[in-house]
Amino acid sequence: MARFQRHSLKVGNRVTKAADLTIRETLFPLFLVTILYFLWGFAYGLLDTLNKHFQNVLGITRTRSSGLQAAYFGAYPLAALGYANWVLRHYGYRATFIMGLILYGIGAFMMWPAALKQSFGGFCGATFIIGSGLGCLETAANPYMAVTGPPKYAELRINLAQAIQAIGTVVGPVLGSYVFFNDTGENVDALKGVQWVYLAIGCFVFLLAIVFYFSVIPEVTDADMEMQAENTHTESSDNEKPFWQQYRVFHAAWAQFCYTGAQVAIAGYFINYVTEVRPNTSSALGAKFLAGAQGCFAAGRFSGTALMKVIKPRIIFLVYLTAVIAFCAASIRTTGNTGLSMLMVTLFFESVCFPTIVALGIRGVGRHTKRASGWIVSGVVGGACIPPILARAADNHNSTAFAMLVPTMFFVSALTYAIAVNFVPSYVRRVDATGDKPKESDSSVESVVDEKVADERKEIVQ
């Protein structure tokens, strides 16, 4: 089958059996989608670096600088519950990918005039459009990774793709520290680097949108998901219930809100934390430490994905999130290299939480999968709500370390979902069902064979 050709964006609600594809058949489409994960990881990494440096270059407070996170993540629910989800349900994944890339490119190009005018409001506006594009990509990419291919590997696929995203979050701070601010210092000339980097990003994503337009990738329709749910969740299925009665989905969305908001708050004020608790640490050096912490995050993604081959993802999720709470709480009262280490280990254990919440949350909801994905991804709006709370606490107490109490509390709230998928029977049955039980025909054939063997043995004895 040709990899590239012009074809319609509208798919309809036919059965495509994308879940029946072999691992080999899914390599090309999942490779293309994995590139999208790197792009939003890169954008997120740049955002964390710009947050601190805008405080210095533009002379704004920690609370006001959180406007970047508010703009970026505030766009997510509009996309995930609005236009992106509508396009996903009416046209399909490829159309949603293309729309997200176009919005991402437009926002990247708008960074140029914002830098020329040295306008923080302009940066926030451009960041909002970038967030809209990334919200579209994430609304489609996460469920696409989870449902394209054998269901039992859903968490492994999405965590592996998110590991590539984590590499992007490492590249972002490295680029920010070496290109934006090292050569020119913390002044307005440093914003020229922002212009050129985002110009390159805009050109690349528009080219990638063209690639997706001509690419032939498998689609996953509501009919596909209904059939998959019937095959994997015959005993624990409640897919026939209206979407508003899928309470596990909303619990997952709340966990995503709390977890993502806490993660974004820590990463967004990581440089502030390090420069305050570690003597003689500049913002540029803090950005390098952030890159190292994001490296720990990426390592956690890869190691967590490897562990999921032998240990159930829900167990890994519970252990990792519990460790996140322990080390984040420890960072509140520690200083120097010890405090830095506590946050770096926190990022390591954060690694698998986001993608695992998505994969577990949409499992077994059948025809509601796309809508469920929209709700869970919209939980990313926590990244717009929680960082300002941390920033206000830091400004009021003049201590970012003290403010780490805020993400710790939200992590505890997210832990309720991890506990539920491990100990509440209705949750456990749903997330553990993968449809890998032996077929009745196979077992009946085996029993017939066993009976014949037994009869032959009796005849021999007689």
Image (spheres, grey):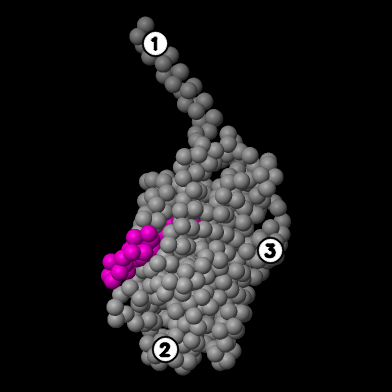
Residue 384 is drawn in which quadrant?
bottom right
At 46% from the left and 53% from the top, the residue drawn is: 412
Q: Is residue 100 visible to us here?
A: no
Which residue was labeled with disc 3? Answer: 82
At 65% from the left and 66% from the top, the residue drawn is: 78
Q: The C terminus appears in which quarter of the rendering? A: top left
Front position in the image: 250 or 217: 250
How far apart, in angstroms, are the residues tagged by discs 3 and 2?
A: 39 Å
How far apart, in angstroms, are the residues tagged by discs 1 and 3?
A: 69 Å
Q: Earlier in the sequence, mark 1 or mark 2?
A: 2
Residue 366 within the segment the image draws in magenta: no
- Establish if 290 lies above or below 152: below
Asked which secondary structure carries label 3, the reply is helix
At 66% from the left and 61% from the top, the residue drawn is: 81
Magenta: main secondary structure equals helix
Which numbered dot is residue 186? 2
Q: Amino acid at mark 3?
A: Gly
Q: Amino acid at mark 1?
A: Lys
- Establish if 255 lies above or below 52: above
Asked which secondary structure carries label 1, the reply is helix
Q: Earlier in the sequence, mark 3 or mark 2?
A: 3
At 42% from the left and 89% from the top, the residue drawn is: 186
Residue 96 is drawn in which quadrant?
bottom right
Left or right of residue 109: residue 279: left
Left or right of residue 439: residue 9: right
Left or right of residue 374: residue 24: left
Range of magenta residues: 328-355
Q: Residues within 10 Å of mark 2 (few under 14, many from 20)?
A: some
Q: Is residue 338 visible to us here?
A: yes
- Establish if 113 lies above or below 127: below
Which residue was labeled with disc 1? Answer: 458
Q: Position of residue 154 (x, y in %)?
A: 50, 51
